[in-house]
Amino acid sequence: MRCLRHSRSCSRRCTAPRGAVSFGFFLPNQLSFFIVFSIIVSILTNSLEHMDTTPRIGFTIKTLSHRIGRTLGQQLRLEQEAASTAVRSHILGYFAHHEVEAVLQSELGNHLLIRRSTMTNILDGMESEGLVTREEYQQDKRQKLVRLTEKAKALCSEHLKLVNDFETSLQSNLSDEELKQFFAITKKLNQILDTYT
């Protein structure tokens, strides 16, 4: 009688179970692995076939934000990561819109809804490129005042025009009713998110 471990008759010293069926080259542990692997493949295949394709709010917004940042970055020709590029343009835009010479780093972060560590990293990069300077705030030395350099000021008007043109291009592809619904929905989502803080 052929054993289950080998594809031949074995001596009495072989401790493998004996039976009429041979599994060829499969050893018991290989056979177990093959069975488990087959089951996993079957489960994954079945899962993919029944995967929920319902649109997700968070994923949709994140993807859209990333694409806008990347496209805007290409428009601004700044060789930075997309999210960082978008924030840089918002920082320049903040100075352009508010017409201020200096602003507290914390105030800038709060306005742009950016975490302190993220803002610090972005300003570090801008400072190394000669776009901003930071100095101690005399009334509270824990705070930093952020100022644009002359190099950054020269970029402000150009960047602001590109950002405005980009925004106009996006809005021109939506009807007034679609824009109204969009801003109403995003406002409501912001209000919902406020309840989590």
Image: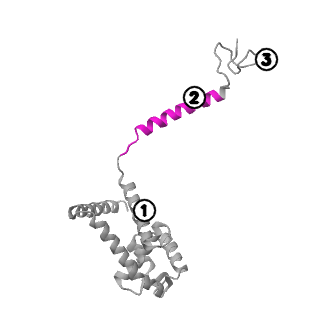
Name the residue rendered at 48%, 34% in the picture.
43
Comes first in the chain, label 3 or label 2: 3
User: What's the residue type where badge 1 is placed?
Assistant: His
| Residue with the most extreme left position | 177
Q: Which quadrant of the structure image shows residue 191?
A: bottom left
Amino acid, disc 2: Ile
Asked if the stretch drawn in magenta spans residue 154, the answer is: no
Please say which color scheme the image uses: one colour
Q: Position of residue 177 (x, y in %)?
A: 20, 62
156 with respect to 136 (left or right): left
Q: Residues within 10 Å of mark 1 (few under 14, many from 20)?
A: some
User: What residue would you read off at disc 2?
Assistant: 35
Whether label 1 touches label 2, CB < 8 Å: no
Q: Which residues are magenta?
A: 30-53
Residue 155 seen in this snapshot: yes
Q: Main secondary structure of the magenta part?
A: helix
Q: Which residue: 54% across, 31% down?
A: 38
Q: Residues within 10 Å of mark 3 (few under 14, many from 20)?
A: few
Residue position marked by numbered label 3 in the rendering? 13
Q: Nearer the viewer, mark 1 or mark 3?
A: 1
Mark carried by residue 66: 1
Q: Position of residue 140 (x, y in %)?
A: 47, 84
Quarter of the figure with the C terminus: bottom left
At label 3, the amino acid type is Arg
